[in-house]
Amino acid sequence: MKLFIIGGGGREHAIAKKLLADEKVEQVFCAPGNPGMKQDGIITVAIAENEHEKLIDFAKKENVTWTFVGPEAPLQRGIVDDFQKAGLLIFGPNQKAAQIESSKDFAKQIMVNNQIPTAAYKTFSDYQKAAAYVEEKGAPIVIKADGLAAGKGVVVAETIEEALTALADMLEGNRFGESGAKVVVEEFLAGEEFSLLAFVKNEEVYPMVIAQDHKRAYDGDKGPNTGGMGAYSPVPQISDEMVTKAVKEILEPAAYGMVKNGTPFTGILYAGLIATKDGAKVIEFNARFGDPETQVVLPRLKSSLADIITALLEGTKPVVTWHDQAAFGVVVAAQGYPGDYQKGMVLPQTTTEKTELYYAGTAKKAENLVAAGGRIFLVAAQASDLKTARDEVYAALAQMDLPQMFYRKDIGARAFK
Ligand code: AMP
Ligand code: GLY
């Protein structure tokens, strides 16, 4: 098999590496990929993820077996629709189904129509009305821009003033372009977050093992929201019972609800959940793998990822089995991320025997691999237990020279309480 991945981050590095581990898979191309992933034998292709025609031409020219889409932006732009129109096999939701991530309002309607537990909410496009609702509900309260905002369109407001500022920014300042014209004002949910992902084909749902991401930039869950600073799996403080219930009451009704809505979903469905005292509730759906969750979930997949995707594309039943081992990953980011950040720092190209590197924002400069993005790479380990995996990752990080870079020192802290 010759496979093609769209995207260029750590998530795509992890997907490509997992696919390459299968002896049936001869080659994995990644567009645009990043220079760091070449170390693992992944072939990068210099085509941007929004150049659908060029990507289609490449897939045809190389006669790839199928294409897998990593990030949300091409899904929202309809890359799956375009490949399918060209007669190519591609795994991911089409543009209509991708709305479960790209429009918070769409996602909320699917949840309400299918009795999926989620935070109470209201959608507004008028500042005065939104402000009145915030005053009525009080703080803490959550304000979300409707539309994709790379994890930065959410403000968890501790005070009413903070909420009003966020509303003014999103509705009047139009901070997120057209998507800023609409906001969702949502009840604050207290509890631990976890990510539950599944392979989905219409009503069929094959859940993955859960992971916990760390969204805030700094230790102690302080600082701004980011794309994610580290993750681990399993998450022992979330009971199996809660996960089983979440599959039945959240993932399955979501998949079924999408079919019923006339927007059937095929691809990776990601539920961002909060374990409240009344059970798991949804804070968001994503239409793709999570980053950095993928870097700790896929290493635990025992069966072949290539076989699973092939089975789903062919309409047969996939075999999905998991290792008991724990996996742990810490993101190294550029100083300043998620705001303006430093670039060009020389990066490590090797790590300890017990750890692995997944590259994201990297570039090649002469013989060096250098930093070229906010999240630069992730150090991961697998071990029989979480604590061992964590110690291996932090030991590897301690040996690295990381000028103008930072990482969180407390990934996994909630699991070790
Ligand atoms: P999202 O982009 O929707 O994943 O939101 C980013 C982060 O904001 C989440 O990972 C949560 O930490 C937090 N968040 C979002 N919605 C809520 C909510 N209703 N209650 C509490 N925290 C939330
Ligand atoms: N790690 C969160 C996400 O991928 O959306």
Image: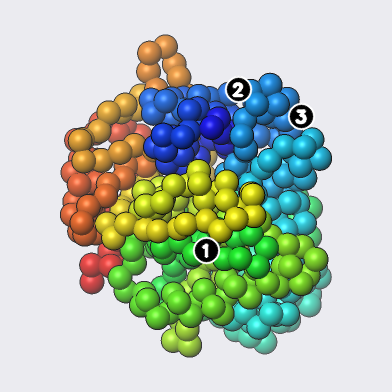
Viewport quadrant of the C terminus = bottom left
**Real-space Cα separation, disc 2 to disc 3, in angstroms:** 13 Å
Q: Is residue 104 visible?
A: no
* Image position of 206 with respect to 392: above or below: below
Residue at 65% x, 83% y: name it.
115
Relative placement, left or right, of 57 versus 364 is right
* Image position of 109 with respect to 77: above or below: below
- Residue 230 percent location from the top left of the image: 38, 52
Which residue ends up furthest to the front in the rendered image? Answer: 316
Q: Are marks 2 and 3 in contact (CB under 8 Å)?
A: no
- Residue 242 percent location from the top left of the image: 43, 79
- Residue 152 percent location from the top left of the image: 58, 54
Which mark sits nearer the N-terminus, 2 or 1? 2
Q: Nearer the viewer, residue 299 or 98?
A: 299
Sort mark 2 into few (<14), some (14-19) or many (20+) by Cα contacts within 10 Å.
few
- Amino acid type of the residue that numbered disc 3 sits on in the rendered structure: Glu
Q: Is residue 357 visible?
A: yes
Which mark sits nearer the N-terminus, 2 or 3? 2
* Image position of 174 with respect to 368: above or below: below
Instruction: Look at discs 2 and 1 and give the one toward the viewer.
Output: 1
Question: Label 2 belongs to which residue?
Answer: 46
Q: Mark on residue 206?
A: 1
